[in-house]
């Protein structure tokens, strides 16, 4: 298993995140050109990170936008 270096990740909160501090998703857009989209819970920045393909991230965003 290879490790992915996230030291250069520039985390930003998704626009779909709740403003009440509940559902807070952050992703590192600057790493997308490398072929991955790192995603984490902003309430737990030292916690686990999901490494998604850009296609999987796009599917997630569509799902979140339609899950009202």
Image (cartoon, helix red, strand yellow):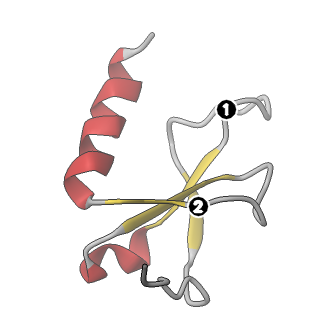
The mark total stands at: 2
Q: Residues within 10 Å of mark 2 (few under 14, many from 20)?
A: some
Marks 2 and 1 sit apart, C-alpha to C-alpha, by: 15 Å
Front: mark 2 or 1 = 2
Would you name the residue on which mark 2 appears? 49
Marks 2 and 1 in Cβ contact (< 8 Å): no
**Residue 25 at x, y = what percent?**
59, 46
Quadrant for the C terminus, please: top left
Q: Quadrant of residue 37?
A: bottom left
Quadrant for the N terminus, please: bottom left
Secondary structure beneath disc 1? loop
Would you name the residue on which mark 1 appears? 23
Task: Give the vertical position of 20 relative to 2 (above or below).
Answer: above
Residue visible at 43% across and 84% down in the picture: 2
Q: Quadrant of residue 6?
A: bottom right
Among numbered discs 2 and 1, the one appearing first in the sequence: 1
| 66 lies left or right of 12 | left
Residue visible at 25% across and 59% down in the picture: 54
**Residue 62 at x, y = what percent?**
28, 31
| 30 lies left or right of 42 | left
| 48 lies left or right of 28 | right
Q: Residues within 10 Å of mark 1 (few under 14, many from 20)?
A: few
| 6 lies left or right of 47 | left
**Residue 56 at x, y = what percent?**
27, 47
- The residue lying toward the viewer, choosing from 8 and 17, is 8
On residue 47, the disc is: none
Residue at far front of view: 1
Residue visible at 41% across and 27% down in the picture: 64
């Amino acid at each position: 298993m290879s490790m992915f270096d996230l030291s250069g990740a520039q985390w930003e909160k998704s626009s779909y995140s709740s403003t009440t501090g509940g559902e807070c998703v952050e992703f590192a857009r600057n790493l997308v050109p490398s072929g991955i989209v790192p995603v984490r819970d902003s309430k737990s920045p030292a916690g686990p990170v999901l490494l998604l393909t850009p296609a999987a991230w796009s599917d997630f965003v569509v799902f979140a936008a339609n899950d009202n």
